Amino acid sequence: MSNLDIDNSHLSAAQQTRLSWTKFIPAYDQLPPAYQKDYDALFTVGSKFPYTLWTPGYADLLKPVPERLICCAEESMTIFEKRGEKIRNVYMKYDSINYIENGIVLLHSWLTIFGIDQNGETAAPSIRYNTVSEELLLPVIASLRAIPNLQSGSQLEVEKSRFNYLSNINFKFMNYGLQSIRNGDQVLKIMMQAEIRKEIVRILGKSFSKQVTPAHIFILTTDEIISIRNTGKVSTYGGIWNYIPRKNICSVSLANDDNGRFILGLQFQSGQQISMIYDESQKSEIENLRDVIRADLSETVVA
């Protein structure tokens, strides 16, 4: 039985809120019974119990969100999804994951994993969770990101100091960048792009516009590309993080739109892709960035 099947109207507002929180499952004997059979079919009896979380199901305006069990083992992650009495799973090895997206908008958060599943098919399972539970998701995100080179000789405080110039430009993104850098990361390049808007009509001297792309920051490290952007039209609170291991990129493109803006595209073997928009003032910087990423691909081919 899931949270969707239970009448919780007798509970206080605080108690109902806590029902939406993610829970940490520390041991096999604390697994919800509904998942034990499917868990046993995938994991060897007596093996090390993986880092495991349970996220509750809940009603949504568009469609119900099913409850899930997330298991992060040493080389793979499995997401069990419960809909009614049926449970399906998506199994992905870490080396088959192209990139991840972590979004936070007030109390609504999500983690989406883009890659190839156990059937060799393109997959993008998404885990929705209450932001109150964010700390429990951090080990999952750490498992899915590129492993930093702890022998690189980089000093964390030195690397973080590279974001200082943003304090007077965009304090929010400066902090987001600082939060994303780990011990062992070497920051090679930081590109900040302000929000781009397009005028759609002018009435009585007043301009009305629509957003082309939200403000975003691009951080290039030796092992990873970190792209962070505002959440767009819905809210300026929170942000959306993409963590992209550089070794996973199979091609890079740079195109112009009809307004002179530049679209940087990153493609993966699975056919999945991600793109970022920059205004024309960033031309030389974005061309240099494209060439740096393209050099990775040449090195891969030579190797």
Image: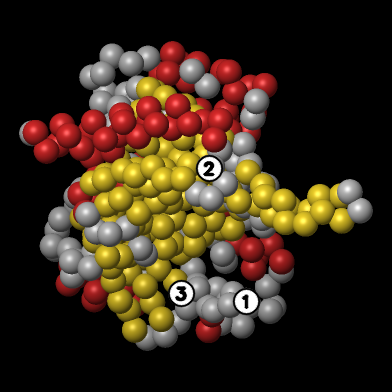
Mark 3 is on which residue type? Answer: Pro
Q: Nearer the viewer, mark 2 or mark 1?
A: 2
Image quadrant in which you'd find residue 149: top left
**Could you tell me if the residues under marks 3 and 1 are in contact, i.e. CB atoms within 8 Å?**
no
Q: Earlier in the sequence, mark 3 or mark 1?
A: 1
The residue carrying mark 1 is 61
Tell me what residue is drawn at x 62 percent, y 76 percent.
61
SS class, disc 1: loop
Q: In the image, 85: left or right of 49?
A: right
**Could you tell me if the residues under marks 2 and 1 are in contact, i.e. CB atoms within 8 Å?**
no
Tell me what residue is drawn at x 38 percent, y 42 percent.
254
The residue carrying mark 3 is 66
**Nearer to me, 139 or 122:** 122
Q: In the image, 109: left or right of 208?
A: left
Tell me what residue is drawn at x 56 percent, y 38 percent.
279
Residue 30 visible? The answer is no
C-alpha separation, residue under disc 2 versus residue under disc 1: 36 Å
Please, which colouring scheme is shown? secondary structure
Q: Earlier in the sequence, mark 3 or mark 2?
A: 3
The residue carrying mark 2 is 261
Q: Earlier in the sequence, mark 2 or mark 1?
A: 1
Q: In the image, 170: left or right of 125?
A: right
